[in-house]
């Protein structure tokens, strides 16, 4: 008999006034007992609507049924069939708009906590399992992957499980892509990313770091090295700016640079070798998850006041609700329906404030969202000593510009011919932010998965 409690078991978290001063993980995870009780809320629906909401098609009712029986390792085996990064997905996947949105328990109450259960199973396995995974039987074929972010790692894992010799080339000195440099420790501890990367190395995936592809090696050279297909999952690491006066002042960061210094180079630790400004008042421009991450990180670095400036309203903020709520609880001040027009500097070239204009919402634009319109004569200033631009990123053009026949659209994203991720070059597939522009981790993983299946078919058909 299922547990018919309409409420999902709450996720325990650090108290807001404690966590906004440290970089430890905010969410603490379910205990074994709570996980089993939550799993017992699942109705094991025959038509499995939740699975349709999962971009990597995890057999959700099957893994949850095993948790409900207390067979956590069995649950992990089910997850492992579909995802190489379950501890990551359970933490950063926007479940509320994916699998959990389709859950039938959500009709008359709250959905089953699918993401929380996925996180529990992955953490339990990491903490308790001592067995190394079995090495897949080699099939004699070689594939190269460019980028060790969510799409590249997913494609690598799926292809390695099919017996391919997979080499992943990563531009940075560590694997993980946005999981390592972009998402802060308090949302996704790097030890967890490293462990999921290690799981791939354990099944034979070779990861070569410090390899800026397009400079060190080209796609043509990768083919000459015997790779039969190539997957490009190089992400979207080129920050956008607003092109307003004052963006070159000291104290203006792209969210990418700010978060990379903190996440990868541990700028918050006193002995860190990379400097980061510990601003008294920080303004973050943007309303997505990256903006929330930057604002919450600035607060943890010691800013007394942190503002989010966003040109649409609270309803339109693109960040996950959970991230917005956590940011509000931690004291971030939201200035929605405001847009910066100039960053103001002092006589030494340092940021001293930002001038904004109020906005109101007009008719929907081509994106379907109501267009923000300036309110004439409503300009005002916010004092601050740091401004972080979190208004999006574009793909780096290094790979497309060094690969004949690899076409991009006007936003610099690689053009793919179909859902498999096939680009305009034979044998070259792509997915994730390099194709879509900045999107979510789970969509990138879904693209990596589809491309891996297509690469397998392509090589078998040769
Ligand atoms: Fe849900 Fe995301 Fe896990 Fe799929 S990967 S089951 S969408 S939380
Ligand atoms: Fe369980 Fe919800 Fe999926 Fe039904 S829709 S199988 S209740 S998780």
Image (cartoon, grey):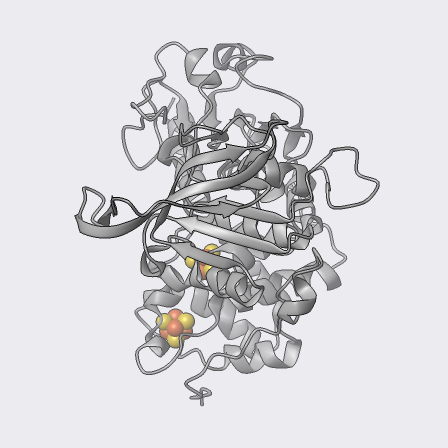
Question: Which residue is painted at 50% across and 82% down in the image?
Answer: 40
Between 407 and 199, the one lying in front of the other is 407
Depth check, front residue: 259 or 159 = 259
| Residue 415 visible in the picture | yes
Task: Point out the image quarter for the C terminus.
Answer: top left
Q: Residue furthest left?
A: 363
Q: Residue at x 58, y 30 (%)?
A: 166
Question: In the image, is residue 50 above or below residue 138?
Answer: below
Could you tell me residue 228's position as x and y percent? Answer: 48, 20
Q: Residue at x 62, y 68 (%)?
A: 16
Left or right? Give the position of 402 relative to 251.
left
Q: Quadrant of residue 177?
A: top right
The image position of residue 229, as x and y in percent, is 46, 23
Up-down: is 366 above or below 101? above
**Image quarter where ligand 2 lies:** bottom left
> Which one is in front, 368 or 252?
252
Is residue 163 at least partly visible in the picture? no
- Residue 37 is left or right of residue 371, and the answer is right
Residue 186 in the image: x percent, y percent? 64, 56
The relative height of residue 262 versus residue 123 in the rendered view (above or below) is: above
Seen at 41% across and 85% down, the residue is: 6
Left or right, 403 with reference to 173: left
Residue 404: where, in percent of width, then height? 38, 9
Q: Quadrant of residue 272?
A: top right
Compared across the picture, whether 246 is left or right of 368 comes to right
Asked where in the image residue 203 lies, by quadrant, the reply is top right
Q: How many marks?
A: 0
Quadrant housing the N terminus: bottom left
């Amino acid at each position: 008999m299922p547990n018919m409690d309409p409420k999902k078991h709450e996720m325990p978290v650090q108290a807001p006034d404690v966590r906004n001063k440290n970089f430890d993980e905010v969410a603490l995870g379910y205990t074994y007992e709570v996980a089993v009780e939550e799993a017992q809320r699942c109705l094991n629906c025959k038509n499995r609507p939740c699975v349709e909401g999962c971009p990597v098609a995890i057999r959700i009712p099957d893994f949850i049924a095993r948790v409900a029986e207390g067979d956590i390792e069995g649950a992990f085996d089910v997850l492992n069939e579909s995802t190489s990064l379950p501890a990551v997905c359970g933490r950063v996947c926007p479940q509320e708009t994916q699998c959990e949105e389709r859950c039938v328990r959500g009709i008359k109450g709250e959905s089953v906590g699918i993401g929380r259960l996925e996180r529990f199973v992955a953490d339990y396995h990491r903490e308790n399992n001592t067995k190394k995974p079995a090495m897949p039987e080699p099939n004699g074929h070689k594939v190269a992957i460019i980028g060790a972010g969510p799409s590249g790692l997913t494609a690598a894992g799926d292809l390695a499980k099919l017996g391919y010799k997979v080499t992943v080339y990563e531009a940075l000195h560590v694997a993980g892509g946005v999981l390592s440099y972009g998402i802060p420790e308090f949302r996704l501890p790097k030890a967890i990313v490293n462990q999921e990367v290690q799981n791939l190395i354990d099944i034979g995936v070779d990861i070569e770091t410090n390899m800026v592809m397009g400079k060190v090696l080209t796609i043509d050279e990768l083919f000459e090295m015997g790779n039969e297909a190539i997957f490009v999952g190089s992400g979207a690491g080129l920050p956008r700016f607003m092109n307003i006066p004052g963006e070159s002042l000291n104290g203006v960061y792209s969210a990418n640079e700010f978060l990379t210094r903190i996440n990868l180079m541990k700028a918050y630790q006193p002995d860190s070798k990379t400097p980061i400004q510990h601003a008294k008042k920080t303004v973050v421009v943007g309303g997505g998850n990256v903006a929330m991450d930057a604002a919450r990180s600035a607060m943890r670095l010691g800013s007394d006041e942190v503002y989010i400036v966003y040109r649409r309203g609270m309803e339109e903020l693109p960040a996950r609700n959970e991230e917005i709520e956590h940011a509000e609880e931690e004291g971030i001040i939201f200035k929605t329906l405001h847009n910066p027009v100039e960053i103001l500097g002092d006589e030494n070239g340092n940021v001293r404030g930002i001038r904004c204009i109020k906005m109101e919402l007009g008719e929907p634009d081509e994106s379907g969202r109501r267009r923000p319109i300036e309110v004439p004569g409503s300009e005002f200033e916010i004092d601050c000593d740091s401004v972080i631009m979190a208004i999006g990123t574009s793909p780096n053009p290094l790979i497309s510009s060094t690969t004949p026949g690899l076409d991009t659209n006007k936003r610099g994203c690689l053009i793919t011919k179909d859902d498999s991720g096939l680009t305009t070059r034979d044998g070259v597939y792509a997915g994730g932010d390099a194709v879509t522009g900045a999107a979510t981790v789970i969509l990138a993983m879904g693209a990596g998965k589809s491309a891996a299946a297509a690469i397998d078919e392509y090589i078998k058909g040769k």
